[in-house]
């Protein structure tokens, strides 16, 4: 089996720029592929639902340019997954444009660029549901029905390794993929080289966040993964970072429900019996992983839909008496809203985020409140109509200034207004789909298009 | 001793859009075994600590390779929903610091 070396310089291409020094070290380590994931569901439902990037194009371009220059110089393929945060068609098209622009600026020789689209129309999902497909709820969610789709604006399917393998087999030099399983974009070239599903997906699982699998903690530094049939070898490229059994094992459990299993289209990676060994100062070898294939193919769907418009207002409170009676003050302010706009929850909603008390943890906050010196309150109002949201929000905030508490001494204003203005926030969206759709072939929701780029 | 003095990492983070997962990682085996064998941390204990119904503790795992204990709590609402204040779930771990480990 051919030894394959993969480098990855960033765990989320475009959020903040990759670090070039360790990337150059990686490029000098004879890599066969450069791979980077550019998406995440961590950014919340807004970017997918509204179809907007969460990252700044300046850094997206910076990272793509660095990787593309290296890939063309070394004559090795470049694979980018989950283009532009969401992996929607907008994201794929944006990255195709960046690749073309950068290729033009540097007058690259012609190369094959593959685009793999993964967005599906809500109506297509609806059609499959009508035709009897099961769209299974993940992580305890109920299965999808028509009402869930009614609340959904945009859907992406999360591809596994197969569409990327197909593009590589067809001669792609650069692949811009829509929403993809993070570990599948690494697994695809390893599987094409004949490596096992277990090693391929473990390598991807370990590398998907780049230097997060090393220690000490550093982001945006390059990691080298090597798979040769005797295990998965992970090496930190930053001079001060190492991949150790502890750092690689810790990363195996990062951001997941369960540290032993990673589900991908076609089955799951089982890490229960992984053995982690330090083989040189900067490298850890992992063996013992297995892959359990599933008899049917399931593709994960992510969907987001708009809930309402949103407005914010910021106030601060320093008066210890008002702070001690804050719930009463907020209760009074809410009562005034009900009087003027009808019951909260009927056509609008209001949230008082009390920073300094329990804004961060809310109902999960176990520590009994200690009287803070001051509190900052972000008043959030959501309502279908933006102008009405702003109007309600202004009153919701200003009413803390006029809060009627029986023994208040500061009768000239019970709150500090930072700036007497309503801040227009972007609309509230919600994750409507976190589901899996059964498919006959794990390729069927994805569309690949090739073009030749370069002079 | 408090958990914060025995663990090198105590963190929380989204695990998908519906859950927040908590990792308690001990630097050395001795501290890890002390935490593990104390019996202080289990699904019921973390449910009590965060004042959630134990049915919302979806996973609780002792992860030996990383000298770690890991558990996952289902969110009341998906991340980023209106009224939400910790999009990444990254600041929910602090109450674990003061857990007494005999």
Image (tube, coloured by chain):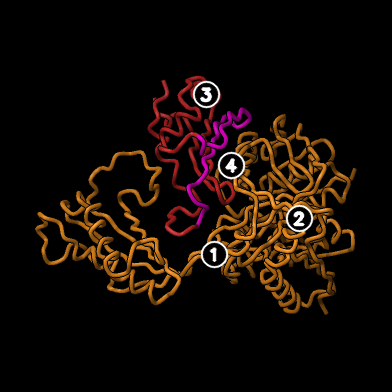
Chain colours: A orange, B red
Residue tagged by mark 2?
A132
Determine if marks 1 and 3 fall on one subunit: no
Marks 1 and 3: which is nearer the front? Answer: 1
Local SS, label 3: helix
- Residue at x-position 42% and y-position 75%: A386
Residue A9: where, in percent of width, then height? 66, 55
Q: Quadrant of residue A113?
A: bottom right
Q: Chain of mark 4?
A: A
Q: Is residue A336 left or right of residue B69?
A: left
Name the N-terminal-most of marks 4 and 2.
2
- Indicate the quadrant containing the N terminus of chain A: top left, top right, bottom left or bottom right: top right
Q: Residues within 10 Å of mark 3 (few under 14, many from 20)?
A: some
Residue A35: where, in percent of width, then height? 73, 56
Residue tagged by mark 3?
B36
Q: Nearer the viewer, residue B25 or A391?
A: A391
Q: Which mark is residue A46?
A: 1
- Residue at x-position 83% and y-position 65%: A173
Marks 2 and 3: which is nearer the front? Answer: 2
Q: Label 1, label 2: how many angstroms apart (C-alpha)?
A: 30 Å
Residue tagged by mark 4?
A215
Q: Chain of mark 2?
A: A
Badge 1 vs badge 2, beta-carbon distance below 8 Å: no
């Amino acid at each position: 089996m051919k030894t394959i070396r993969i480098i990855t310089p960033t765990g989320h291409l475009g959020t903040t720029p990759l670090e070039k020094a360790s990337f150059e070290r990686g490029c000098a380590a004879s890599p066969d592929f450069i791979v980077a994931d550019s998406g995440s569901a961590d950014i919340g439902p807004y970017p997918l639902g509204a179809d907007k990037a969460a990252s700044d194009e300046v850094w997206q371009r910076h990272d793509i340019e660095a990787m593309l220059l290296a890939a063309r110089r070394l004559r090795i393929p470049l694979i980018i997954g989950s283009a532009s945060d969401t992996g929607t068609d907008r994201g794929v098209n944006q990255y195709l444009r960046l690749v073309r622009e950068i290729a033009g600026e540097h007058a690259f020789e012609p190369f094959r660029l593959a685009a793999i689209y993964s967005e599906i129309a809500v109506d297509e999902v609806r059609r499959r549901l009508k035709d009897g497909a099961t769209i299974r709820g993940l992580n305890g969610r109920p299965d999808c029905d028509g009402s869930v789709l009614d609340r959904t604006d945009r859907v992406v399917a999360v591809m596994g390794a197969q569409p990327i393998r197909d593009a590589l087999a067809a001669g792609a030099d650069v692949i811009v993929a829509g929403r993809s399983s993070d570990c599948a974009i690494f697994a695809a070239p390893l599987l094409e080289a004949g490596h096992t599903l277990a090693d391929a997906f473990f390598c991807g699982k370990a590398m998907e966040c780049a230097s997060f699998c090393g220690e000490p903690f550093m982001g945006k530094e390059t990691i080298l993964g090597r798979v040769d049939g005797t295990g998965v070898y992970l090496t930190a490229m930053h001079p001060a970072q190492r991949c150790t059994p502890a750092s690689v094992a810790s990363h195996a459990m990062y951001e997941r429900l369960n540290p032993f299993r990673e589900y991908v289209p076609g089955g799951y990676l089982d890490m229960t019996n992984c053995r982690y060994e330090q083989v040189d100062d900067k490298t850890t070898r992992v063996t013992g992983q297995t892959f359990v294939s599933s008899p049917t193919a399931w593709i994960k769907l992510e969907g987001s839909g708009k809930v309402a418009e949103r407005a914010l207002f910021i106030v601060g409170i320093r008066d210890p008496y008002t702070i001690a009676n804050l719930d009463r003050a907020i209760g009074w302010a809410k009562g005034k809203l009900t009087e003027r706009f009808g019951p909260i929850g009927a056509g609008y909603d209001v949230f008082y985020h009390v920073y300094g008390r329990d804004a961060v943890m809310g109902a999960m906050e176990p520590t009994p409140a200690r009287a803070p010196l001051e509190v900052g309150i972000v008043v959030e109002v959501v309502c279908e109509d933006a102008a009405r949201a702003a109007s309600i929000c202004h009153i919701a905030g200003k009413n803390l200034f006029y809060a009627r508490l029986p023994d208040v001494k500061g009768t000239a204003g019970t709150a500090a207004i930072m700036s007497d203005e309503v801040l227009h926030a972007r609309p509230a969206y919600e994750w409507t789909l976190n589901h899996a759709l059964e498919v006959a072939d794990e390729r069927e929701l994805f569309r690949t298009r090739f073009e030749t780029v370069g002079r | 001793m408090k958990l914060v003095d025995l663990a090198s990492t105590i963190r929380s983070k989204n695990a998908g859009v519906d859950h927040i997962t908590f990792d308690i990682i001990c630097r050395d085996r001795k501290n890890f075994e002390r935490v593990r064998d104390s019996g202080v941390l289990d699904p019921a204990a973390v449910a009590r600590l965060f004042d959630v119904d134990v049915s919302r503790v979806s996973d609780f795992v002792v992860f030996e390779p990383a000298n770690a204990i890991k558990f996952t709590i289902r969110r009341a609402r998906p991340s980023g929903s209106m009224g939400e204040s910790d999009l990444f779930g990254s600041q929910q771990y602090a109450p674990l610091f003061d857990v007494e480990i005999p």
